[in-house]
Amino acid sequence: MVDRVGAAVIRLFAPAGAFALFAARALVRPFAPPYEGGEILRHLFQFGLRSTPLIATSGLAIGVVLSMHTRASLERFGAESMIPAGLAIALIRETGPLTAALLVAGRVGAGIGAELGAMRVTEQIDALEANAVDAFHFLVSTRVVACALAMPLLTILMDFAGMLGGYLAEAVASGMSWRLYFDRSFTFVSYADLLPATLKTAVFGFLIAVVASYLGFNTTGGTEGVGDASTRSVVLSSILIILSDVILVRMIFFFYPQVVG
């Protein structure tokens, strides 16, 4: 009985331990030479620049929707002048970073999982290691660094697009000028709102790349396993992003108490 319980516990926690070791290695390995600058730049282009249409379009739409909902709520209290500031705070603090991370998890996470999974089942990773290439460093570390660097930049784009969408909605609804809208938007926004909320997305990028790389690196079962790795990459990275966001927001409130007000 004890042996069966112990075996069940090991089966339950072994994948979590393996993932933790993989993540720790992915966190440390990029700081050791050789530094694959070319690969990092290539992945930055793939993860960052090619994601800009999705992020910009989504941010614009979210800004319009948030502006309409904010106006519907604040009109009840005669506080229409607070709409730009309320929209800016909501976007910069939480909506922009979290939405950008979930969109990137869907686009980039699935791609990394499928790409590395296909390389595993076709034995390309084994071929790299047979040729004395550090496959983990070349395939995983470069993607982790690129995704962690791309996420804050994409978040800033999301925030800007959301603010633009909010302005368009407000201009149609009330005819507010561009200058007045952005003056009111940043009245209550400080660097304590912008910097922590933007920088925390580097953690989201790290989680996306690590989860997708881990699942792709350990793919089995041929083409069916590749599809499974791609799907699980999106699901697991999205869950970890949401859970880590709770912890990171609590840490931001601790280190930047002025954000709470």
Image (cartoon, rainbow, N blue to C red):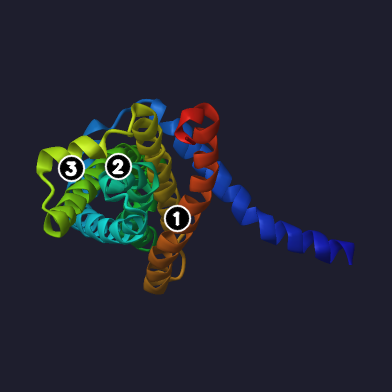
Disc 2 target residue: 85
Of labels 1 and 2, earlier in sequence is 2
Percent x, y for residue 82? 30, 45
Q: Is residue 141 visible?
A: no
Please, what secondary structure does the residue beneath circle 3 have?
helix
Disc 3 target residue: 181
Mark 3 Cα shell of 10 Å, populated few (<14), some (14-19), many (≥20): many
Query: In percent of the image, x 34 and y 29: which residue is there?
Result: 190
Tell me how far mark 1 sits from mark 2, CA to CA.
31 Å
Percent x, y for residue 103? 32, 57
Disc 1 target residue: 237
Percent x, y for residue 152? 31, 39
Tell me how far mark 2 sits from mark 3, CA to CA.
9 Å
- The front one of 31 and 87 is 87
Quadrant of image for the N terminus: bottom right
Q: Is residue 197 visible?
A: yes
